[in-house]
Amino acid sequence: SVEDLIARFELCLELGITTLDTAEIYGLFTVEAAVGEVFKARPDLRDRFQIVTKCGIDVPSTEKSFARVPHYNASSANLIACAEKSLRLLNTDRIDLLLVHRPDWFNSADDTAAGLNRLIQEGKVLHAGVSNYTWHQFELLSSRVAQPLVTNQVEASLLCMDALYDGTLSQCEQRGIRPMAWSPLGGGRLFDSENVAGRRVRQCMAQLRDKYDGADDDALAFAWVMAHPSQPVTIIGTNRADRIRSQAQASQIQLERQD
């Protein structure tokens, strides 16, 4: 219900969480509308959060009747249309940060940049960034946009370290921008009893709980990602109050190097 969502928003503020991450396709196009209902009921909450949303993925649905198959679409026309729709659904007059959800291999960087530039020029979007881009793709789009890209949202966890090895986080550090890390718990694999790597990580965590004041495993996993010098902003992917509280503990944990 809207009341339950408002309670979660207020809990986030209580814990110092002020960034809200969503996307056009989340919940099959229902999440942005739910957030908009919160802001409609409580307009005072809008200015207390930074809204991050993403667009550029089309999937067959009633919302995307033209889509025959799932595909990426970062054309300027699609980015503008999606952003304007997000503004309506979110009940807001601006998007604090708009991300291109996935790299579109068949669209030119010039055209993608044109869409982002226009949205920023019109004041509908304050800042732009990308999600799931390689550092090469980031550099290409960066060379075309009028205003610097401010983040690259990528998968990063104890079970997915690609961004540490492929130069993505190093590039963010070099540019002085903070990446955003999605799925810091490995998409749940970290707690899957059938996942061998997850079991090994949990065994290590069990030895660290007392050292870090009884911190929960998910808080330790978040803290590990946040320890990278690029200072990743980790994304909490739950609506459960107890999990939000637990994962928010990560900001208070300073892992020692050998841990």
Image (cartoon, grey):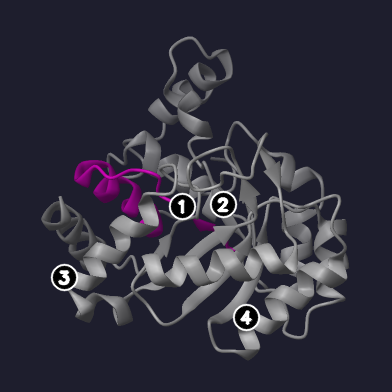
Where residue 120 appears, x then y in whole percent?
A: 62, 84
> What residue is pinned by disc 3?
41
In the rendering, which numbered label is found on residue 119? 4
Q: Select label 2 or label 4 by which is in front.
A: 4
- Above or below, 212 against 84 in this view is above
Question: How far is disc 2 from disc 1 in space, using C-alphas?
Answer: 6 Å
Check the image and report above or below for 84 versus 130. Answer: below
Task: Answer whether residue 235 is magenta in the image.
Answer: yes
Q: Nearer the viewer, residue 238 or 57?
A: 57
- Contact between labelled residues 4 and 2, with CB atoms less than 8 Å apart: no
Bounds of the magenta span?
A: 231-252
Of labels 2 and 4, earlier in sequence is 4
How packed mark 2 is, by other alpha carbons closer than 10 Å (few <14, some 14-19, many 20 or more), is: many
Q: What amino acid is at disc 1?
A: Ile
Q: Furthest residue to the top?
A: 194
Left or right of residue 21: residue 97: right
Q: Which residue is mark 2?
A: 181
Marks 2 and 1 in Cβ contact (< 8 Å): yes
How many C-alpha atoms fall within 10 Å of the one at disc 4: few (<14), some, or many (≥20)?
Answer: many
Residue visible at 45% across and 46% down?
Answer: 26
In three-dimensional space, the C-alpha distance between marks 4 and 1, rounded to whole angstroms, equals 25 Å
Q: In the displayed structure, would residue 80 be above or below residue 181?
A: below
Percent of width and height locating residue 51:
43, 70
Residue closest to the eye, 44 or 233 = 44
Residue 227 location, quadrant: bottom right
Amino acid carrying label 3: it is Ala
The residue labelled by disc 1 is: 235
Amino acid at the residue labelled 2: Ala
What kind of element bears circle 2? Answer: strand
Instruction: Work out whether residue 172 can be spotted.
Output: yes
- Mark 2 vs mark 4, CA separation in Å: 25 Å
